[in-house]
Amino acid sequence: MRTELTPELVLRAYAAGIFPMAEPGGAIAWFDPPHRGIIPLDTFRPPRSVRQVVRRRKFEVRINTAFRDVIAGCADRPEGTWIDPIITRVYVRLHEMGRAHSVESWHEGRLAGGLYGVALGGAFFGESMFTRVTDASKVALVALVERLRERGFVLLDTQWTTPHLERLGAIEIPRAEYRRRLDAALALRCTFA
């Protein structure tokens, strides 16, 4: 028997250190990797080239103004995606509940890139990011970190690390360390929006 994916189930999973991804055919897989990707909020410093892009103000950053468009942008990948209609429906519902958020980079009046994720306590679980204009997603990430710091968040979970995220400051930590940080973050009462 297959369990229906619901916003409440996703929130309980995040609180337990587990996250979902869709697999081909519509099945939902749950992940609790032995090493977890995070961006340390206390030491995050974007690369110089990204700081220069942010200073030039080429992009306008907006929060939660185009959530559905951001998740669609993240799902639109030529190599395929784990963001299927079920995942989309659940995260849009989480957004309507005030739990899922988008950080958007706009350029010349158009959505140029962005990211989305879920806020719970003092943790933000980054789900995905996309770019249509060079550096747009990097600007969104810098804006996300600034917002999280301003609002007292202590954990930015990237789930996995990739070479792209590592260049932006992501590191891997063992599951036990992640769980310790997650427990501390969940004890906080932070507001993202």
Image (cartoon, rainbow, N blue to C red):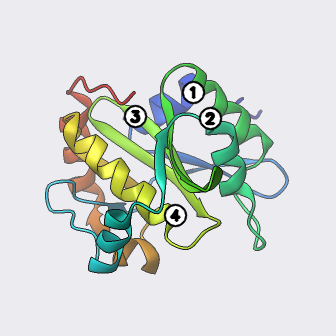
For label 2, the residue is 91
Q: Where is residue 34 in the image (x, y as percent from the top left)?
A: 37, 63
Identify which amino acid the numbered label 1 is placed on: Leu
User: Label 2's element?
Assistant: helix
> Of residues 165 and 34, which is closer to you in this image?
165
Q: Which residue shows up at 75% across the image and 35% down it?
A: 2
Q: Which of marks 1 and 4 is nearer the N terminus?
A: 1
- With 43 as the anchor, is 148 left or right in this view? right
Q: Which class describes the residues within 10 Å of circle 3: few (<14), some (14-19), or many (20+)? A: many
Identify which amino acid the numbered label 4 is placed on: Ala
Q: Quadrant of residue 40?
A: bottom left
Q: Distance between the residues labelled 2 and 4?
A: 22 Å
Which label sits on residue 119? Answer: 3
Q: In this view, does 84 lie above or below 36?
A: above
User: Label 4's element?
Assistant: helix
Camera-near label (2 vs 4) is 4
For label 1, the residue is 94
Q: In which quarter of the image is the C terminus?
A: top left
> Of residues 154 and 11, which is closer to you in this image?
154
Camera-near label (1 vs 4) is 4
For label 4, the residue is 136
Q: Where is residue 99 in the image (x, y as percent from the top left)?
A: 48, 27
Q: Which residue lies furthest to the left in this view?
A: 42
Q: How far apart are marks 1 and 4 (CA)?
A: 24 Å
User: Label 3's element?
Assistant: strand
Q: How far apart are marks 3 and 1 (CA)?
A: 10 Å
Camera-near label (3 vs 4) is 4
Q: How far apart are marks 3 and 2 (CA)?
A: 12 Å
Identify which amino acid the numbered label 3 is placed on: Ala
